Amino acid sequence: MPTERTPLEMNLMETTEHYRRLAEDMPFYVVAFQPDGTLTFANDLIASLVGMSTKQLIGRNFFEFLSTDDQKLVRERLALLSPEQPVETHQQSNLTANGERTYHQWTNRAFFDAAGNLASVQAIGEDITERKRAEEELRLMQFSIDHSPDAVYRMTPDGRFLYVNKMACQILGYSAEELLTMSVADIDPNQPFGVSPEVVQATKKTKTARVESEHKTKDGRIIPVDILVSYVEYEGKEYHCAFVRDISGRKHIEDELQNTHSNLVAAQKLAQIGSWEWDIRSNLANWSDETYRIFGIGKNKLREHRENFLDMILPEDRNLVDKALSEALDGTNDYDIVYRVKLADGTFKVIHALAEVVRDTQGKPLLMRGTVQDVTQGKLAEERIEKLSHFDQLTGLPNRTLLNDHFKFALGLAQRSGESLAVMFLDLDHFKDINDTLGHSIGDQLLMAVAKRLKSALREEDTLSRQGGDEFVLILPGTDADGAALVAAKVIEVVSEPCHIEQHELIVTPSIGIAIYPHDGESLELLSKNADTAMYRAKDDGRNNFRFFTPEMQAKSSRNLKLANALRHALARNELFLHYQPQLSIQDGHIVGAEALLRWQHPELGMVSPAEFIPIAEDTGQIVQIGEWVLRTAAKQLKDWLDSGMRPITIAVNLSAVQFRQQGLTELVVQILNEIELPHKYLELELTEAAMMDNPLDAIDVMTRLHEQGIRISIDDFGTGYSSLSYLKQFKVYKLKIDQSFVRDITDDNEDKAIVTAIINMATSLGMQTIAEGVETAGQLAFLRLQGCSEVQGYYFSKPLPLDQFEAFVRNSNSAPPAI
Ligand code: C2E
Ligand code: MG
Ligand code: MG
């Protein structure tokens, strides 16, 4: 019998059905089961999941569809439920048969009976695999963004930070919390009002924009940044996302490059350096503006062809450029040259060019590039500076600096050769008066004239320098006291000649001080100081003269000067005459010759020795004239003797080295002999070893010519010089005159004995005659005879005699030959 259902029951049933339907249709898995797991309800979705119908599922055990792990999990979760806490939610993950992971979320609701025991459970499950994946994806994304090497911000359009990543904090130095209370304006001085309208505009259009800006860090540093901004619209809201990169490093390099480049350009411009490039294959050149300016031609005028440029080079310098070019291309030399170019206006410029060659991998030159610089001014300035620093501006003479250089050089020479060196200090007397009364311009002109005259009095190797004012310093290499005295005398003479400047006739005299290296000092400082002291002495002694620093030199030089002056008139005043000293044959004691020896009788100075005045005559050059007179007088005398019937003898005439060096000596001698009509064989020329060895090849030449003329030559003072035996053979020498210094001690000094013996033996073997001079004793004579010496001369027989006495001596000896 059908049971009648109450309305309440009916209502309840409807409600139950309603929920069942709802559960059926829900996109969730819905099951209900009893505490032991017996299923009382399952919807379609879960039935399809396990591949059964809902009906088949009712009565089956819910747990048998779960994995052991899930069974354990569900039981644990259910155990947590109580009448007070009847609902729980948990997630389960499962691996499907094909290895994919699925995620489900379950919500269990427990129902309890009145006694509080678990009566049934309703479970609703949802497949959350998709959501889980999206979440995972998002988390990964977030992780990437959080750890991005770029700073990442998300901002509101007005620039407030909504999100900042770790790098943003790191770059800016703020914590994320701090940044999230700030806005772009706080960190970007360029965008004080948030994201700039331009950026907003740009990003709205293109969705992204790239800008460079600067960000200010918490500690106040400004860092350059590169920003990629994107515009995002999400759920009706606008955002800006920015990826920001710190480009300080790159910026730094860029700035450096930029700086270097601009510096280079600026420096080149400043230094007026032009640059150029020449493409070798096309033969086209590329010039910078500065290069065009340097070469003085309009841009493009050149049409960039190198030939046109080469045409500009001065013809004299073309070879140089060609050579440098080919060497640079060969790689044998750097291209670094200075050449001149001719400009359109006819002037020229001095160019300094530097270049490098760019080659391909095979080393073949592709192009040349380099720089050019106008160094005309530099060269001129260099020359000018050189002149300024080394030469006196007024006279053009070397100044103190150059003098120092010259002195060092001369000193080096003197040290090596053992020669002396003279330093002179010259000051003009009363020059100040001229300056004061006639003005500086006249004074300057006078100084220039004096400088010119001084120069004319000096040799090429001498140095004349102006020390300022009216002071001059002279360096005379290879000059001893005697030489210096002569130069000083000559200088005084030329300087004191009247000088015509404008309408004035001026006479200015010098006072000179002399110091001699090494006697008076070995440095320029000391020598010029001593020369200066000597110069003041010259001033004290009445000016217009010279003084030596040392008294002995002064005394000697005073006499020398006196002699030199007196000697000038000696010939004209008949103060010179000859003495004759007989030369005897050692065999029979006959007079075989006479040596003519010069004598000078001065009215005040008295008899002056040839040993004293001959060197002076040689220094002043007067020896040439005097020597000629001696030769002529002696030859004439012999001619007279011969003509008067005297037994024939030879006449020996001393020849100075200065005479020997004179051009045309042979001609002169021959001419004199012919004039006098004296046969050549009667003349014997006495020459010292030094005179011959000074220039042996020339000596051989001269002696050969004399020999060809039948004129005999003997070597005077033999043994005191350094004759080379090999030359001796070539010299056409008739006789060796053994020097008196060997003869002097010949009786007791074994060494002298040996020397004299050797000389005689050598002469004999070379076919030469020997004569010993300075024979004073019988002992000396005996030794010489024993050794086989041919002739003798000396006080033992006779002193050099005046003409009449000599004639008497000859007469006497003819009647009674001397005891020989
Ligand atoms: P010397 O040609 O070697 O002349 C020899 C020197 O020795 C002479 O000195 C002579 O007087 C000296 N004399 C000769 N016999 C003796 C002796 O037994 N004992 C000593 N102690 N001395 C003796 P003197 O005349 O004073 O001439 C000196 C030098 O002057 C000569 O040396 C010669 O080099 C040079 N001389 C003289 N006359 C001339 C000349 O006309 N022309 C040139 N160039 N030089 C000349
Ligand atoms: Mg002699
Ligand atoms: Mg001699």
Image (tube, rainbow, N blue to C red):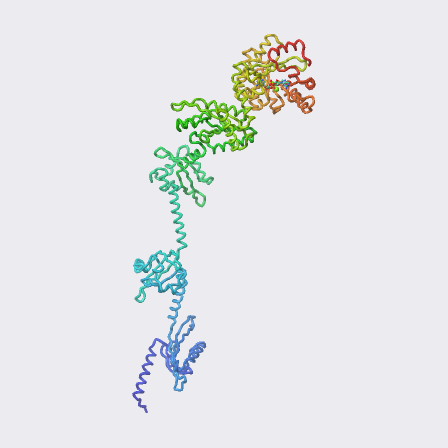
Depth check, front residue: 682 or 517:
517
Instruction: State the image coordinates of residue 389 (x, y, percent, origin top left).
Output: 45, 34
Seen in the picture, residue 77 relative to 555 is either above or below; the reply is: below
Of the pair 48 and 656, the residue shown nearer to us: 656
Residue 721: percent from the left, percent from the top? 61, 24
Residue furthest bottom as drawn: 1
Above or below: residue 752 compared with residue 277:
above
Q: In the rendered image, which quarter is residue 115 located in?
A: bottom left
Say above or below: 224 vs 346.
below
Residue 770 visible in the shown view: no
In the rendered view of the protein, which quadrant contains the N terminus? bottom left
Q: Quick one: 682 or 606, which is closer to the camera? A: 606
- Quarter of the image for residue 600 reads top right
Relative to residue 449, is residue 803 drawn left or right? right
Q: Quadrant of the C terminus?
A: top right
Q: Residue furthest top?
A: 644
Q: Can you give x and y, in whole percent of width and height, for residue 777 in the image? A: 68, 18
Considering depth in this image, is 797 or 524 the residue closer to the camera? 524
**Residue 492 seen from this side:** yes
